[in-house]
Amino acid sequence: MKRLALRVFCAVALGVPHAYAEEAAATAILRAGCTDDVQRLCAGVQPGGGRVLACLKEHRDALSDKCKQAAQQAAGASGGNPAPSPPSAPSPGTPPSAKPTPPSAPTSSAAPSSSSTSPKSSTKSSASAGGRAVAGNAAPGSYLLMKKAQVKFVLDSTPNAQPRPVLEMLIPTTWEFTGEFVPGSALRTGCYSDYSPIIWQAKAPDGSGVFQNIPDYSWQYSDDSQEMQRLNDPYRRARGPNGQTCPVSKPLTAEQFFRENLMGLLPKGATIVSIDPYPELNAMVRQQLGLGPHDAGDSGVRTDAIRARVEFQADDKTVEAWLTAAVVMRTLPVGNGHLYDLHAIDLMSFTAPKGKLTGNDKLLRVMMTSIRLTPEFSARRNKTIAGYYQTQADKEAKIDQINARLQQDMMQIYQHMSDNAARVSRQGYLETSQGIRGVQSFRDPTTGTTMELSDQYDHAWLNGADQYVMSNDPNFNPNAQLSGNWNELQAVRPSP
């Protein structure tokens, strides 16, 4: 927005006196051109006292061209010189690169527009998300206003097939979202399990937060000398789409993986503030894999997860970030020892300006626990990976019967994951699993459909644009404070 238009906003918000006729004309112009922007960016702001104009000023980078033009006209009506036409809107951004990228630092510019449906209204943006107070220790009556974001892809080869969701998650309504499914590729390794990754990013338009994922990373190791020879034999190893083979290296914990792999993705000079176990993420991983809540009795499968807090410099500013990592290790008997099949998954980062990270803790948990692959896509993907292992097993059968048995075991593991995904889709999550993952079920009384939302809020509402409001205040009513028609959801207990 031009400097003259900003002066109009500042003058009105600060109560600078103007001639009555000029002020009335400027106000009428602003009201005519910025109504939609007020509903979209400042719906939760109480009118009066210049608060709405101050809100528009705060979100000047997100204003529509129509509102920017109205601001310039208002500047002329209030006695200012005519301003030149506003610059054209920036071109939409491109999808995330297929190459692994380091965690993004928050900026003041908006992220590329989301492929999912954009909300028609939202609440005032704060340092954490849409809402009056959404920090980790929000006061009673605060709420989160969220929307569903999706990554879509054409899963069928039939004519005129339409893109269908492959990943879904909740993000604040004011945030931008981009996502891409990259079929038939392995961005970081040649391991079958890393094929066809999904890359996504959610970003606050005011630069107060960036939430994104990093492609999975898998590797193998064995303490049996003969098996190690096979693992390092290039003629026996399966090759990825780019000719690379699955890495061979020693087992690592989640913390060790972070220090040896993820730190290298951060800008030079990044420092570690803390590394702590992250039980919420570990519970998510175990539920995704169909495992029990603890390592014991899971047939040689162990998991652990961490969350690291780091600081680094970006654009001469100090940035804070959380990075998460979970490592899944399957131990299979082979020869005189064992084969260790390892997978670093749920690699995510949340970055924010210095001093803003801690206040986003609850928001991170809400978004993280809402991420899920759709059951249809999960079943198809795991079945495809199982087919890769079956093909490799047929090849290895001609070379070595022991290796063939190993590949068969791997195929059965992923087949089990596929069956588990289908079972979860049919019967829903059990209440004990929901408690571990920090979510609860709600039913839409108007349609009878159920959904999972964070259990950190006791009350939830939904409108017809896939937007959600969550609150702990039993007296809060979004229909009295927000635009749109909100239906209250009913908390339900999951069916066994």
Image (cartoon, helix red, strand yellow):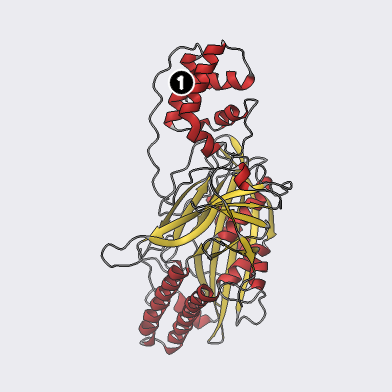
Q: Quadrant of the C terminus?
A: bottom right
Instruction: Look at the picture and state if 389 lies above or below 95.
Output: below
Residue at point 50%, 67% (across, down): 218
Instruction: Look at the picture and state if 84 lies above or below 41.
Output: above
Residue 184: where, in percent of width, then height? Answer: 36, 65
Residue at point 45%, 19% (across, down): 73
Residue 55: where, in percent of width, then height? Answer: 59, 31
Residue 314: where, in percent of width, then height? Answer: 56, 39
Q: Residue furthest left?
A: 159
Q: Quadrant of residue 152?
A: bottom left
Residue holding disc 1 = 72
Three-letter code for the amino acid on which mark 1 is drawn: Gln
Q: How many marks?
A: 1
As helix, strand or loop, the secondary structure at mark 1 comes to helix
Instruction: Look at the picture and state if 482 lies above or below 213.
Output: above
Residue 484: where, in percent of width, then height? Answer: 53, 45
Residue at point 43%, 14% (across, down): 82
Q: Residues within 10 Å of mark 1 (few under 14, many from 20)?
A: many
Question: 27 or 208, which lies in front?
Answer: 27
> Does any portion of residue 355 appear in the rendered image?
yes
Asked if residue 397 lies left or right of residue 11, the reply is left
Residue at point 56%, 28% (across, down): 57
Question: 139 or 349, which lies in front?
Answer: 139
Instruction: Look at the picture and state if 390 lies above or below 454.
Output: below
Question: 320 or 72, which lies in front?
Answer: 72
> Does any portion of residue 270 appear in the rendered image?
no
